[in-house]
Amino acid sequence: MTGRRLRDLGLHSVPLRRPLDYPGRPVREACLLRGDELLPLRAREGALGTWRVVDGGATGELDGVLEALGAAPAGRRHPVVAVGSNASPAQIAHKLGTAGVPAVVPMVPVTVRGIGVGCSAHIGRAGYVAAAPYADPDAERPLVVGWLDPAQMAVVDASEVHYRRVLLPGAAYPMTPPAGPRLGGAYVYVSRHGVLLDPATGRPRPGGGDQSALLRALLAASPRLRALLGPDPAAWIRRARNEDAVRELGARIFAEEGWVRAEEGLPGASGQGDLSHAELSP
């Protein structure tokens, strides 16, 4: 489809390759990721599988398009809420492509209540400080939900070693798509390290924004971090991505500065097997 490649849309930057671009550019409307293309997905008052995919001058129901691609239908996929770079189609395509798994993923901005977006209290292997969710009853924000098949979810699980995947029940965390019924539930990745606090406010430091600005703020707030990772964001990335020990020491400094809050408000492991969209539907 002409003009629908990620590069054409300005959505091609992969944060794992360009860490200061973290979290990458998220999708802004419902779409189907198909390799390096992003096809519009027209919402309608019905099940996700009946939404219409626009491919050039042709349209077809999502489940029919998925079947033609040899991919699992919407109902057999697992909805996963992204608070960071998993909302970026380029990042998801990169993760899946590197693992040899087809990047065919419905991605939809969904209004989610009860989830704040902070910063995980660790430094990732690419050098950036990634986003992490925390419980915030007053929060309501659009977050991208990706519907992953079992093989895709296994790849994303393996990429999120600093996180645990938990199930958000829709009754406690209302999730409203652009059309159709609310989601009955969805998964989200919660940091094993807790979230960073802003010493000026005592509240979680906002995450998912400009990575350079975040790293500059962290460097300005801690002489020890400046000595380890300064003087600027480029130096931080260069040093952090080269050495495990540097990343681990940086995370230890976060804790010793008193900036870390354990995330205890979100659900723990459900003890259930992985539930599909159909099984979670209200």
Image: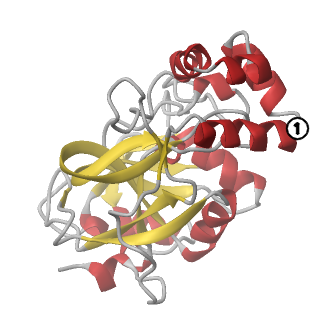
Q: Residue at x 86, y 42 (%)?
A: 245
State the image quarter where residue 277 is shown: bottom left
**Residue 36 appearing in the image:** no
Identify the residue shown where x is 58% and y is 14%. Answer: 216
Q: Position of residue 58 (x, y in %)?
A: 36, 48
Provide the secondary structure element on which disc 1 rests: loop
In this orientation, which residue lies closer to the viewer: 199 or 130?
199
Q: Which residue is mark 1?
A: 243
Which residue does the image show at 68% across and 51% down from the upper left?
A: 95
| Three-letter amino acid code of the residue under disc 1 | Glu
Residue 167: percent from the left, percent from the top? 38, 73
Q: Is residue 203 above or below residue 230?
A: below
Q: Against 234, is 109 above or below?
A: below
Q: How many marks?
A: 1
Q: Position of residue 203 (x, y in %)?
A: 33, 37
Residue 16, given in percent of the width and then of the height, sits at 70, 37
Q: Is residue 76 left or right of residue 168?
A: right
Q: Dot 1: within a 10 Å radius of its alpha carbon, few (fewer than 14), some, or many (20 or more) residues?
A: few
